[in-house]
Amino acid sequence: PQAAAADYLAGLNPEQRLAVETVDGPVLVLAGAGTGKTRVLTTRIAHILATQRAWPSQILAVTFTNKAAREMKERIAHYIGPGVEGMAWLGTFHSICVKILRNHAELVGLKSGFSILDTDDQLRLMKQVIQAEGLDEKRWTARMFASLVDSWKNRGLTPKDIPEGEARAFGNGKGRKLYAEYQDRLSVLNAADFGDLLLHCITLFKTQPDVLRDYQRRFRYMLVDEYQDTNVAQYLWLRLLAQGNSNVCCVGDDDQSIYGWRGAEVDNILRFEHDFPGAVVVRLERNYRSTSHILGAASHLIAHNEGRLGKTLFTDDKDPEAEAVTVASSWDSEEEARAIGEEIEALQSKGHSLNQIAILVRASFQMREFEDRFVTLGLNYRVIGGPRFYERAEIRDAMAYFRCVVQPADDLAFERIVNTPKRGLGEASLKLVHELARASRIPLLEAATQLCRTEELKPKARKALSDLVDSLDRWRAQLVHMKHSELAEIILDESGYTEMWRLDRSAEAPGRLDNLKELIRSMEEFESLPGFLEHIALVMDRDTADAADAVSIMTLHSAKGLEFDTVFLPGWEEGLFPHQRALDESGRAGLEEERRLAYVGITRARKRAKIWFASNRRIHGSWQSSIPSRFLDELPERHVEVVESSTRYGGYSGGGYGGGNAYGVSRFDARDPFQNTYSTPGWQRAQRAREAGSQDHGNRSDMRSSRTRAQGPLTIEG
Ligand code: ATP
Ligand code: MG
């Protein structure tokens, strides 16, 4: 094995080598982005296997996403060949826990074939529980309850463990009872929700010492990537297993902790040395990924955070041609998409692979413009870590309403909206509609209209259905004389659809509302509603998912651990990034997490990081001037180049950076971009505007969520 060993160890620096070769006892690798943490884990596994310390099935390796698990498997296969298939315990916390639970389900009150509930099922069940307790479900919504239960489960708390105060705060003091009741019903259904996977596993380990000992013996070596984003439950789980032997290696970077809103505890890193006595702590300081400009910019930015352990990072990259991090502005977000599209085409024509280009956005609604633009350009793209914009549930729902208005015979659309939001139409009523439609060979909507004129439906159902039918008729009539984007907004309001999400307390709800606004905005670019629908049909039809060469579009959250030659970072504006919801939060925690997200974003780039901000974002059809992100001020001049905009409405007119709206108080008329002339650099103006407290987010305030800790992404893989 010595020859092979030389192979995989070759090229590692001494610290990396130490982390790889210290296989016995606890090891913590605490290091900045791109220093080879993931590579250390992979090599360590190869080393353990090559030196025959363990079989593949005796290694527990935890990654943050399934995608990361697949990639790690590929990398290990590269070193050790097909033996990697025996690595049965390489995956996310969730996937590993499911596997354990399947073997011991009956010990936690389940049967082996238990099902895992999706969010919809989970909410339906919670609603039943709330109703059964006789509570007002408008006041105590299932969504509120769901996020509360999630937060308990993230902390490893079963119903009996939750603090009295928290238990009392929900459901007229019945929080604990509701939680217990919900768990009972799950067990009767032989089902678990996502949070249960860990919680049940912990319970299993705590109550069944034999089982725990079994796993402790089995897992000779344990490895965890992205350790900074583990939550309390995951930590407890790991610690239980590590009591057997302490061959645990965790790698992480406190500066990349970006899931605090979901219960992750960066303190787990700080606790490591305490809980694993004798731990070897390895610091990696050499960054192998990025140019010195990129690294310099990212390090300088993150240094503005107070709550950090602090580390040194350097690179040996001495490429004299290395490009500075660029900051460019555009008149608005549409222009931003156009300009970035042009840059990508230019890179492509110089022979760059699209696979090596990524666009990282703060909020998923930002993706829409890029997707539209790329479809127009015929540029392949893929959306990672979530559905493409027009495939999102809320967008499909909204589109279904519009389709019903334009095409009354669109049965699929009608089915989608007939009871969304819930109108109290039971299955029996809907069945009658379907039967009549089939029997008379008429569309569902027509059948519904006819049924409403008979006595066949129960009064409540009839009222609900005829309200919907009447509304659709009314909207169709309005379409003739009203601007379609305005009508679209009316439809979503009057149907109760927007309200449904507004009342929703889940972490995704604010993002969904943003997406709906973005949808309406995108409609304005089209002549008519049918024209818009046709465009969407075309966009949807194009399946670029398997394209060999494609630009990646994703949220900053889902970019963790990845790397690309060129990274575009659009939308660096106050209120968007840092996100308004983080700014609204009291204390620095929210803002610091946003800054870590910026750090994650920049450090994804190997050669080029290109930051953009738009001088204007259109919200509800009216232009809002935006203030450049404070993070721009925090970039070091020495590593940053401010790019003169080449585009027609480029925001640098007047020689300044910011496009001249950084006072944030003016509203520009969309059709007169040339008003946009100031001479003070935008960053400085932004700074002053902030100091003067003159931020004007105008309409944006209604985009805010009433939750305080909700600055997360829309979709999370994991
Ligand atoms: P992140 O914090 O972003 O997850 P990381 O610390 O996990 O980063 P890796 O992804 O493991 O870093 O490594 C970053 C890049 O540097 C990869 O392309 C990796 O192959 C390369 N790399 C790491 N160590 C070395 C080395 N000793 N020699 C050459 N390249 C290296
Ligand atoms: Mg990594």
Image (cartoon, helix red, strand yellow):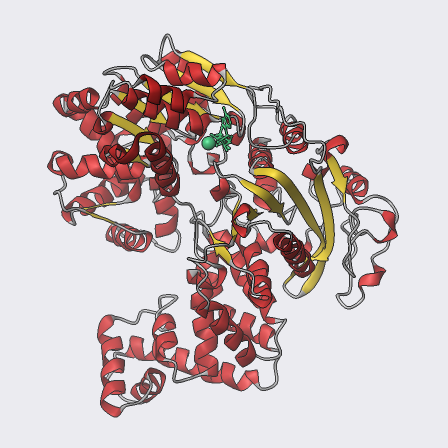
- Farthest residue, direction top: 278
Please state the total of marks drawn on the protein image.
0
**Residue at x-position 46% and y-position 15%:** 282
Q: Is residue 163 something one can see in this rendering?
A: no
Q: Position of residue 263 (x, y in %)?
A: 42, 34
Q: Quadrant of the C terminus?
A: top left
Answer above or below: position of 83 versus 575: above
Answer above or below: position of 245 versus 169: above
Answer above or below: position of 458 versus 340: below
Q: Position of residue 399 (x, y in %)?
A: 46, 71
**Residue at x-position 25% and y-position 54%:** 128
Q: Is residue 201 something one can see in this rendering?
A: yes
- Farthest residue, direction front: 3
Residue nearer the viewer, 132 or 565: 565
Residue nearer the viewer, 510 or 211: 211
Residue 565, picture quadrant: top right
Tell me if 668 is positioned left or right of 385 in this view: right
Residue nearer the viewer, 368 or 286: 286
**Residue at x-position 73% and y-position 50%:** 329
Residue 403, picture quadrant: bottom left
Q: Position of residue 237 (x, y in %)?
A: 29, 26
Q: Position of residue 529 (x, y in %)?
A: 55, 78
**Residue at x-position 30% and y-position 43%:** 194
Q: Quadrant of the N terminus?
A: top left
Tell me if 444 is positioned left or right of 693 in this view: left
